[in-house]
Amino acid sequence: MSEIIEIKTAELYVGHNDQVIKTGSVGSCVVVALYDKEKKIGGLAHAMLPHRKNNIIENKYLARYVDEAIINLLEDLKLAGSNKKNLVAKLVGGASMFRKLTEEKNSIGTQNIKIARYTLERLNIPIEAEDTGGSSGKMVIFDLRTGIVDVSTAL
């Protein structure tokens, strides 16, 4: 039986082998899963905003901002013994939850997706799969034995 680890918005977790990382309430937020296929080490970050707009450091939230969440996740994976060259990424979320209030191209969700893609590209971490955009919330389950990210849509 796998150990289930639940994370909330603005949190991240790194684990291995027989663990499953789970998060819900993924709307405009972006969930980034990084996985080392060789060592079966992975991590999940549930980030809510594209990037920091000021210089105030809030250590309590390691995954509040997409760009910082990816960097923090990468650092934790390295500490756990992962090799960056073995990592692949999967992205979930970035929905435009209130399409009538915001143009989709300017929504927080769209900005979150762009920053996630940009940051991963800059770090040379390939994106293996995505379930991004749309207008529905999602729930994410990441099985670290297999690297499979299971996404459920909430209507």
Image: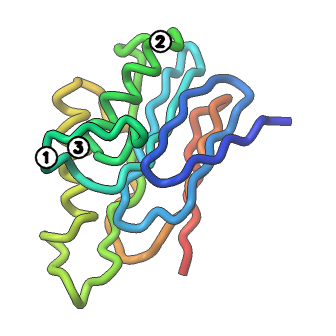
Asked if residue 20 is positioned above or below residue 88 in the image, the reply reads below
Picture quadrant of residue 59: top left
Whether residue 52 sits left or right of residue 17 in the image: it is left
Which circle's residue, 1 or 2, is located before the other in the chain?
A: 1
101 left or right, relative to 11: left
Q: Secondary structure at mark 3?
A: helix
Lower sequence index among marks 3 and 1? 1
How many other residues sit within 10 Å of disc 3, few (<14), some (14-19) or many (≥20)?
Answer: some
Q: Are marks 3 and 1 in contact (CB under 8 Å)?
A: no
Q: Is residue 24 left or right of residue 103?
A: right
Which quarter of the rendered picture does the C terminus lie within? bottom right
Q: Of the residues tagged 2 and 3, which is closer to the observer? A: 2
Label 3 amino acid? Arg
- Looking at this view, name the residue that lies furthest to the right: 1
Residue that badge 1 annotates: 54
Q: Amino acid at mark 1?
A: Asn
Q: Which of the numbered marks, if any, corresponds to residue 100? A: none
